Image: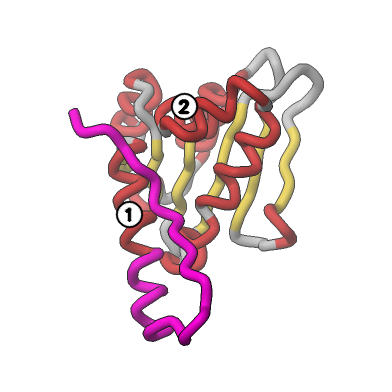
Amino acid sequence: MQEHLIIDGNNALYAIPTLAKSMERDRQVARADLLRMLEPLQARENCLLTVVFDGRGGKTSLSKHQGNSEYSIIYSSSSQGADGVIERMLIAAEFPQHITVGTNDNLIRNCAYTHGAAVMRVEELLKKLDNAISTTRNLRGVPKKNQQKFENRIPFPDE
């Protein structure tokens, strides 16, 4: 059965230093950067990936990232919030043991544990992302001469 990774989008935005700085300037750009950043993880892990953001009023909306049926983006209603959406997803899950929630929010972490899902801190998520990027790079082989090297790793302060 395919694993489902659910990311607490706003929590991740504030936990990743480069995106937190970007949030100060433009929230939409920071969100788009996070979604692009997670693409290699979804592709390499071949998992269902759902990123849940707090919405700004209106109803909860669901869309697919760049038409990818296995990469969803949810904007919560203002009354429910992203935490409420994640909690409802966990409660409704038929196989919660196949879900991992990526967040540093202790309430959501406890909710995930209570419903039988796994939890991953944002720092762990970044390590998994770096591993997916490295593995993909190794499968592609050595870059050709004059080919620009693209580095997608995020510096994260040591604790």
Q: Is residue 79 left or right of residue 57?
A: left
Q: Quadrant of residue 31?
A: top right
In whole angstroms, how far apart are the C-alphas of marks 1 and 2? 17 Å
Asked if residue 140 is positioned above or below residue 135 in the image, the reply reads below
Q: 149 and 121: which one is in front?
A: 149
31 left or right of 18? right
Q: Amino acid at mark 1?
A: Lys
Residue 119 in sight here: no
Residue 100 in the figure: left or right of residue 48: left
Is residue 147 covered in magenta? yes
Q: Residue furthest toward the left? A: 159
Residue segment shown in magenta: 133-159
Which residue is located at x 73 percent, y 29 percent?
A: 60
Relative height, residue 135 to residue 9 (above, below): below
Quadrant containing the N terminus is bottom left
Mark closest to the chain's N terminus, 1 or 2: 2
Residue 58 inside the magenta-drawn segment: no
The structure residue drawn at horizontal position 38% and vertical position 84%, both measured from the top left corner, is 142
Residue at the front extreme, as displayed: 146
Amino acid type assigned to the residue bearing label 2 in the image: Asn
Task: Tell me the residue that label 2 is attached to.
Answer: 11
Q: Which mark is residue 128?
A: 1
| Residue 39, disc | none
Quarter of the figure with the C terminus: top left
Secondary element at image label 1: helix
Indicate the position of residue 77 as horizontal and vertical percent values. Answer: 71, 22
Residue farthest to the right?
58
Image coords of residue 36 (percent x, y): 59, 52
| Residue 127: percent from left, percent from top | 30, 50
